[in-house]
Image: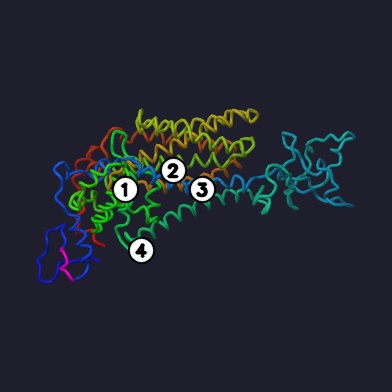
Amino acid sequence: MGVGPRKGAGPGPRGTREQPEPGLGDTGRNRSRNQLSSPPPADLDLAMTFAELLARLGGMGRFQVWYVASLAVPLLMLASHNVLQNFTAGVPEHHCRPRAAANGSAADVPLVVAIPHDGHQRPQRCRRFVEHQWGLLGANGTNGTGGSAATEPCRDGWTYRDGIFTRTVVTEWDLVCEAKALRDVAQSIYMAGVLLGSILFGVLSDRYGVDPHGRPRRGRHHQRLLLHAGPVRAGRHGLCVPPLAPAAARRVPALLPLLPLLLVISGRPDLALKGLRKVARVNGRRDEGDKLSPEVLQALGVPGGSGGGVATLIRSPGIRRVSGGVACVWFSTSFAYYGLAMDLQGFGVDVYVSQLLFAAVDVPAKLASAVAVMRGGRRVAQAGSLALAGGCILATMLVPNELQALRLTLAVIGKGALAASFNCAYIFTGELFPTAIRQTGLGLGSTMARVGGMMAPLVRVAGDVAPVLPPIIYGVTPVLSALLTLLLPETRNVPLPETLRDLEMRAGHPKAADAATVTVPLSDTRA
């Protein structure tokens, strides 16, 4: 609820607040503000942006390194859940349970007379003979395919062979043959749960946040916290923001010193000042921290338009192009990524070896992407990684199944390229969107990535119609997205856009830029 002027006092100027009289409450807060207030030093630019202020306090210094490392530890235990189904839902070799003999049990029936063979002389997985074909059993135990003998589905269940997988949800619920699509549906439902959980807990965190003392509090500007939470470095390499740090920061009160701008717009510049001075002290910039004052923080303002809602992402031509391109990049990257990562058994190599290679390739891929975005540019690195991934996936179609090592090599390279694409997407997306809606833009990308993860397992069902369809779809999607990426502006060595006006001016839409609101008055941000 907003705080208006006291009775008998005239309305103050826009962007100012009345100071309560002694004894009327909140005296400790005002006393703290008065003690911290001091004239700003002459060498401190009051017109600097928040990113420039953080750069003066050490940029990506020791405090930010500790911050990222503290978040990386729990995240290491979360990533494995997305590919867990490769092992919990592994499909062992199986065939129909033979029909029981007239004077015995099914175990007494030789497999060759009960189950037809496929083209590779292996028992078919989903069909059995209607009648036992004893003629296929020769004197020396040889057998044939059964010719034109009638077959039927597995009416009595399946027999699973011992191998890499002995007991999984597939064997528990017989998710094979006609029911094998349920395995892919289960993975899709899991990814849908991840998406819904992200939205739900994001809304709850936005609606019921925490105050500077760790107590639950309801506030309509907690989304603004996401715009500047986390270490930010605005220099020749652009914006460096750990993508998962803001969401975690909302839930970890110990990380509240990284939320100074939220405290400023919430009317607590004194607490923001303490947090920033702590950052400066840990980063070895104590002198820069001592120069700060509440007046300096209030002078930063709150850049942006009328809000950071989803509608802002399609409000004007320039932002629509950026939003559409970002959505395609994130969707195609996640879509192809999980299309490869969740089909380890399809390469015909031990799934544990495949998983090890798929995980290990991420390290050099992400390092290479970091070099590429700094030297070649964000747009080139993003488009190149997507095109390489799509090309490798399409190339696996041309490799015979007998050359398993070559097929796996192409898949590993494609997986590494998609990991690099994720790395590029985080950096590129953060630099494309203006500060006021930067986290909203990252949220759009994350949402589209979840949608891609949901769709990827369902595409494998198309393999029942034509085995070549899944690799074609997985390969063509990132290639098309790479072409669309070339329509996005390059952000390397370009100042970060602070407002929607900045973005529209760079996109060549002056009319849309003039229609954009530049600032949000401080007095309008009281919850």
How far apart in space, not on screen, are marks 3 and 2 (Cα)? Answer: 24 Å
Q: Which residue is mark 2?
A: 331
The quadrant in which residue 129 appears is: top right
Residue 506 left/right relative to 206 = left
Q: Position of residue 413 (x, y in %)?
A: 51, 31
How far apart in space, not on screen, are marks 4 and 1 (Cα)? Answer: 32 Å
- Mark 3 Cα shell of 10 Å, populated few (<14), some (14-19), many (≥20): few
Residue 357 left/right relative to 306 = right
Query: Which of the two marks, 3 or 1, is nearer to us in this view?
Result: 3
**Where residue 313 is drawn, which disc sits there?**
1
Q: Which residue is mark 3?
A: 77
Disc 4 and disc 1 in contact, CB within 8 angstroms = no
Lower sequence index among marks 4 and 2: 4
Q: Which range of residues does the magenta coloring cover?
A: 18-23
How far apart in space, not on screen, are marks 3 and 1 (Cα)? Answer: 33 Å
Lower sequence index among marks 3 and 1: 3
| Local secondary structure at mark 4 | loop
Query: Which of the two marks, 4 or 1, is nearer to us in this view?
Result: 4
Q: Which residue is mark 4?
A: 215
- Mark 2 Cα shell of 10 Å, populated few (<14), some (14-19), many (≥20): many
Disc 3 and disc 2 in contact, CB within 8 angstroms = no
Kindly tell me whether residue 317 is visible in this rendering.
Answer: no
How far apart in space, not on screen, are marks 4 and 3 (Cα)? Answer: 28 Å
Q: Amino acid at mark 4?
A: Arg
| Local secondary structure at mark 3 | loop
Lower sequence index among marks 3 and 2: 3
Q: Amino acid at mark 3?
A: Met
